[in-house]
Image (cartoon, rainbow, N blue to C red):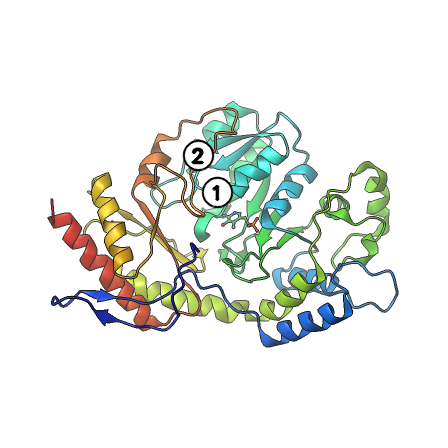
């Protein structure tokens, strides 16, 4: 992601005498290519110039409309609105759920910058909720803050694909009358106890940015079962009076309620983004299998290494291992630094949530100075300080995962024993 120009092939070179001194050549930031049918369709659209999602002639082929239908059917939801990013979908979901300037929105403290960004975009203030050692929202702290904060909405981020006990979350939301919005940027196709994420609350937002489960460079999908949220989101997204050209939309009567009350924020998805995405939806199931096999391979290598702590993932959590996180226990900050540097020298680029400065895609609540209240989330800070993160590219193979595991475990033991 930082422009490492390595090839995707495994190339393992010995750089020293010792057995474990290998340099791996795996580009962990490799995004997934667009299927050929998508490329062909984008070419057609480019030649015709019809790149905008709405057409003015009947008979126009509307790729975004078809994508909305297909994604709604895939998820089993009634309404889907395609937009220009997941961040936009979350912002719109909050707006449509009634969040207004000065409101408080509960949010787990371990998330990505666009998520508090979506809250700030509404003029609202995030109230950060602690996470547990397993990287999911701490339901005890959620209860505390739900009763003390006056917030009416919980924006739950399934950060890096970690899914909290959703039956507990839904119970708490009902108890405190909280509207639930799910950030599913890393959980497209993942679920809890047989139900897909995005289907638990009032609305869900998905990302189609290059490093998520389907890739169109940029893009987002808002899903909901609520006709009023769907109609508002369509109008906000910038539909003009062309909202009939939406594939998974409510009846005209619902638009009559909102038409002239909703400003146009111009957050549409383009036709070519949808054309790239459509052939990727049927691939989600096999991608999930591949990711989980790669994840398991690496997890097996890291398991049972004293000092490397993997999260507990209950059976009900039907996650997709498109990235892996683990905690380094018993290391000083400078040992963690040495660990990361040495891993990188050996070809394994890991990210660290304990960084004092925001780096690459990785930042933490301490870097989000736009928030009104500087939050105290000491338990989360403890977790983030030792939290290491690695993306798993779909282009990887199992032997590469095993080799990465060996680099991580041998480097960890070297750093731990050195002083
Ligand atoms: C990537 C990501 C987002 C934002 O997605 P965009 O499409 O880039 O706006 C939101 N939440 C999480 C957890 C993410 O990883």
Q: Nearer the viewer, residue 351 or 125?
A: 351
Residue 168: horizontal and vertical position, in percent? 48, 42
User: Which of pointers 2 and 1 lies earlier in the amino acid sequence?
Assistant: 1
Q: Mark 2 and 1 residues: CB-CB less than 8 Å, in contact? A: no
Residue 211: horizontal and vertical position, in percent? 49, 58
Which residue is rendered at x = 65% and y = 27% of the image?
101
Q: What residue would you read off at disc 2?
A: 367
Residue 110: horizontal and vertical position, in percent? 43, 41
Q: What residue would you read off at disc 1?
A: 168
Locate the C terminus and report the quarter of the image it occupies. Answer: top left
- Establish if 300 lies above or below 10: above
Tell me the CA gap for discs 2 and 1.
30 Å
Q: Nearer the viewer, residue 23 or 194?
A: 23
User: Picture quarter containing residue 270?
Assistant: bottom right
Numbered mark located on residue 192 in the image: none
Q: Tell me if 168 is positioned left or right of 43 in this view.
A: left
- Establish if 160 lies above or below 5: above
Residue 329 in sight in this render: no
Q: Tell me if 120 is positioned left or right of 353 in this view.
A: right
Which residue is rendered at x = 43% and y = 70% of the image?
395
| Element marked by disc 1 | helix
Crowd band around label 2 with a 10 angstrom C-alpha radius: few (<14), some (14–19), many (20+): few
Q: Nearer the viewer, residue 45 or 184?
A: 45
Q: Tell me if 13 is positioned left or right of 350 in this view.
A: left
Residue 255: horizontal and vertical position, in percent? 83, 46
């Amino acid at each position: 992601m930082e422009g490492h120009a390595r090839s995707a092939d495994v190339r393992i070179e010995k750089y020293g005498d010792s057995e474990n001194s290998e340099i791996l050549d795996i580009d962990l930031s490799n995004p997934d290519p667009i299927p050929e049918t998508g490329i062909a369709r984008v070419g057609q659209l480019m030649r015709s110039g019809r790149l905008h999602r709405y057409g003015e002639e009947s008979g126009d082929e509307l790729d975004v409309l078809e994508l909305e239908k297909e994604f709604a059917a895939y998820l089993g939801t009634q309404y889907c609105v395609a937009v220009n990013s997941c961040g936009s979908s979350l912002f719109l979901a909050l707006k449509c759920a009634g969040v207004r300037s000065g409101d408080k929105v509960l949010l787990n403290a371990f998330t990505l910058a666009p998520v508090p960004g979506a809250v700030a975009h509404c003029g609202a203030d995030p109230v950060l909720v602690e996470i547990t050692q397993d990287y999911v929202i701490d339901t005890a702290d959620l209860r505390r803050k739900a009763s003390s904060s006056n917030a009416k909405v919980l924006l739950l981020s399934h950060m890096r694909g970690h899914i909290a006990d959703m039956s507990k979350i839904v119970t708490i939301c009902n108890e405190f009358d909280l509207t639930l919005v799910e950030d599913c940027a890393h959980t497209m196709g993942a679920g809890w106890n047989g139900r897909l994420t995005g289907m638990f609350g009032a609305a869900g937002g998905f990302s189609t940015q290059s490093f998520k489960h389907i890739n169109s460079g940029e893009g987002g999908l808002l899903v909901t079962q609520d006709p009023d949220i769907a109609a508002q989101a369509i109008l906000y997204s910038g539909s003009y009076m062309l909202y009939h050209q939406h594939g998974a939309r409510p009846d005209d009567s619902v638009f009559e309620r909102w038409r002239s009350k909703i400003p146009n924020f111009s957050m549409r998805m383009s036709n070519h983004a949808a054309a790239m995405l459509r052939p990727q939806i049927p691939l989600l199931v096999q991608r999930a299998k591949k990711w989980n096999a790669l994840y398991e391979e690496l997890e097996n290598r890291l398991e049972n290494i004293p000092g490397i702590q993997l999260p507990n993932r209950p059976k009900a959590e039907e996650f997709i291992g498109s990235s892996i996180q683990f905690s380094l226990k018993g290391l000083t900050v400078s040992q963690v630094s040495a660990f990361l540097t040495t891993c990188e020298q050996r070809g394994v680029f890991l990210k660290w949530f304990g960084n004092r400065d925001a780096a690459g895609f990785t930042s933490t609540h301490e870097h989000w100075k736009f928030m009104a209240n500087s939050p105290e989330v000491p338990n989360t800070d403890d977790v983030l300080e030792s939290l290491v993160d690695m993306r798993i590219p779909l282009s990887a193979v199992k032997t590469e995962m095993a080799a990465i595991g060996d680099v991580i475990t041998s480097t960890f033991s070297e750093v731990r024993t050195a002083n």
